[in-house]
């Protein structure tokens, strides 16, 4: 990669799998290992490897989730793995401060994606009713925030988790 492109100025780590609807009583070692392998381990080692190509002043953005704030039933392992992502941003911001590499988490709420089409009308209505904005986000609304975190406009922003959730986890 270094030979063909030379460097990475912005790294967006968008790792995430989950087992929605799995209560704590149903969690297995295999489920735990699968989710943490992607969400926590994959995030860590992706960033670690990319750092070799990142110049001082770069930006790392991690995808978190509002699940870590809400206590949503059936999301024990997923929410815990995304809480690990939040911890990474705090720790890495301190670790990488001498290089002025900013690390932030973008915590999306409900987004209008192809997966949403699979929701039952009742679940969709519940999500909308639980969101003060009264709707799902357009993917572009999430992308705009990611672009802000990647840009020099956020040069004094590091170590945060920014919820882009229409108020779902905030109100």
Image (cartoon, rainbow, N blue to C red):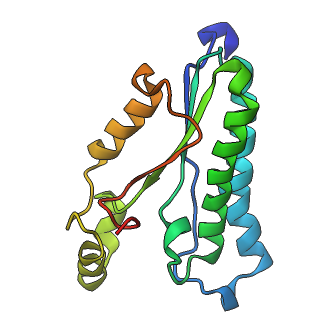
Residue lying at the far right of the rendered structure: 29
Residue 164 horizontal side relative to residue 12, left or right: left
Residue 90 at x, y percent in the picture: 66, 44
Nearer to the camera, 65 or 43: 65
Q: How many marks?
A: 0
Nearer to the camera, 42 or 153: 153
Q: Residue at x 26, y 62 (%)?
A: 136
Q: Residue at x 70, y 82 (%)?
A: 27
Residue 133 horizontal side relative to residue 7, left or right: left
Q: Residue at x 72, y 28 (%)?
A: 96
Residue 151 horizontal side relative to residue 58, left or right: left
Residue 21 horizontal side relative to residue 30, left or right: left
Q: Quadrant of residue 61?
A: top right
Residue lying at the far left of the rendered structure: 134
Q: Quadrant of residue 29?
A: bottom right
Residue 119 at x, y percent in the picture: 32, 75
Residue 20 at x, y percent in the picture: 52, 76
Residue lying at the far bottom of the rendered structure: 25
Q: Is residue 76 above or below residue 83?
A: below
Residue 89 at x, y percent in the picture: 64, 43
Nearer to the camera, 86 or 63: 86
Quarter holding the N terminus is top right
Q: Residue at x 68, y 91 (%)?
A: 25
Q: Is residue 85 above or below residue 128?
A: above
Quarter holding the C terminus is bottom left
Q: Is residue 6 above or below residue 145?
A: above
């Amino acid at each position: 990669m270094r030979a063909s492109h030379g460097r990475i100025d912005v790294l967006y780590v968008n790792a995430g799998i989950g087992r929605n609807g799995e209560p704590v009583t149903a969690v297995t070692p295999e489920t735990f290992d699968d989710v943490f392998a992607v969400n926590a381990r994959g995030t860590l080692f992706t960033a670690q490897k990319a750092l070799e190509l990142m110049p001082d002043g770069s930006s790392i953005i991690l995808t978190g989730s509002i699940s870590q704030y809400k206590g949503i039933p059936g999301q024990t392992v997923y929410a815990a793995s995304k809480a690990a992502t939040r911890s990474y941003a705090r720790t890495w911001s301190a670790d990488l401060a001498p290089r002025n590499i900013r690390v932030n988490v973008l915590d999306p709420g409900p987004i209008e994606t192809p997966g949403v089409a699979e929701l039952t009308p009742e679940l969709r209505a519940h999500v909308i009713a639980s969101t003060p904005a009264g709707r799902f986000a357009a993917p572009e609304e999430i992308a705009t925030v990611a672009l802000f975190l990647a840009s020099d406009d956020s040069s004094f922003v590091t170590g945060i988790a920014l919820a882009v959730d229409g108020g779902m986890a905030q109100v």
